[in-house]
Amino acid sequence: MCSEAAAVAPAVRLRGACKTYRTYDRPVERLFSLFPGLRRLARPRLFHSLQPLDLDIRHGEVVGIVGRNGAGKSTLLQLVCRTLPPTAGTVQIDGTVSALLELGAGFNPEFTGRENVYLSASILGIPRAETARRMDEIVRFADIGDFVDQPVKTYSSGMYVRLAFAVATAVDPDILVVDEALSVGDGAFARKSFERIMTMKAAGKTILFCSHSLYQLEAICSRVLWIDQGRLMEDGPPGDVIAHYQRFLDTGLRPGEYGTAAETAAAAATAGTAAGDGDPPAGPQGYARLAGVRVAVDGTEGTELVARSGASDVSIEVAFDSDPALPSPTVAITISTADGHILTSVATWEEGIAVARDPAGRGRARVVYPRLPLLKGRYLVGAYVFCERGIHSYGWVDPAATLEVTQEDIVKGFFRMPHHWMVEAS
């Protein structure tokens, strides 16, 4: 009989792991808490950064983590990295862990970049001779030039992250933990970093990856965790979890509240908001941006459009600006249901379409859906600009427009599927 202990241990196992902090209304109460005789005068309030959590992550899994700022994502990653002890419960790790957490973590600002490379590697148990052998590769990937021999305190945030990521991934860890620190990197480095993450994924490494780019998470991860207010809200396939999380961001509704009076109230509160209002999330500077989206039905442009099923032609044009020195960006279009589930998508890189640019780096891509095959319903159009491999997102607008599709017949579903009938007498 095979016991659980005899089974292959997961890369990460949490059992009842939680993190709680004591907060005080007045500084003097914190002072009282230090002395046994005065503790009764302190009235702490408990802040649960992470509620008790049971979690297994298998070797070779790439797990994304989503959640609003302050939800508890970074706390979970710090427990995994053992830079933060749990208040209660256990955290078991099988393998070496390398991490890129918040900016400023892990390096001594008084040491040079080279000295910090040796320091970080030694903490991970890498012999100095092995680190010296990998040093040229690390410096080349970080692309910080002679600054590698200057104190880290003189680095810009981008230089710091480039070196930290180069070290974290060059030491060949069993488990890589990446927080949102990569968002401060420039465009060229962001592309390189995601390429390296994909290489590590192909090599069977275990990766925990936290990002606000939902498309990246869906493209890279095999599993996604959604954390809110310190609780694990959902754990499952990327497409399902991300759709529910996006719906939560749009409406404030959590799973279990769909179809209730709460959903009706949320929909009423957001009714009349123009699709695409506000700027898309800003990407790293200096490489590309989504410059505009134009959606038209039968030649009429707008953001609230009506189309006839099986009759209207729908065109979607995406414009972008980019650094001419970098590879041309790529474009993707999504069409989703009103509650955020993607029904279909197209992408230039998937179809081998080269997106042309002018000498200044400006370009456009337009896709046309002739005789729109969507059936009656309300749909959302999303537009995205990515790097040349479709991995790193430069910017997006989703929704860029809404389509209200009408139809004359009573065919049910979402699409008219291409088909033909064959009939004969028995």
Image (cartoon, rainbow, N blue to C red):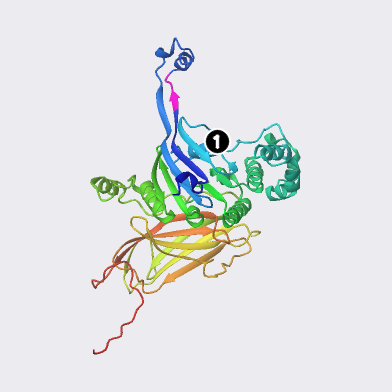
Q: How many marks?
A: 1
Q: List the residue tagged with mark 1.
A: 82
| Circle 1 SS class | loop
Q: State left or right for residue 108 relative to residue 293.
A: right
Q: Which residues are magenta?
A: 21-25
Front in this rendered view, residue 150 or 235: 235
Check the image and report above or below for 182 versus 318: above
Check the image and report above or below for 288 versus 407: above
Percent from the top left, x then y, of residue 184? Answer: 58, 44
- Categorize mark 1 by other alpha carbons within 10 Å: few (<14), some (14-19), many (20+): some
Check the image and report above or below for 114 versus 341: above
Front in this rendered view, residue 268 or 6: 6
**Residue 108 counted in the magenta span:** no
Front in this rendered view, residue 264 or 173: 173
Front in this rendered view, residue 3 or 141: 3
Residue visible at 63% across and 44% down in the picture:
168
| Snapshot quadrant of residue 23 | top left
Percent from the top left, x then y, of residue 72? Answer: 45, 38
Residue visible at 52% across and 67% down in the picture:
350
Q: Main secondary structure of the magenta part?
A: strand
Percent from the top left, x then y, of residue 403? Answer: 34, 62
Q: Quadrant of the C terminus?
A: bottom left
Percent from the top left, x then y, of residue 185? Answer: 60, 46
Residue visible at 71% across and 39% down in the picture:
118
Looking at the image, the residue that sits furthest to the bottom is 425
- Tell me the amino acid under the disc marked 1: Arg
Looking at the image, the residue that sits furthest to the front is 1
Q: State left or right for residue 341 relative to residue 259.
A: right
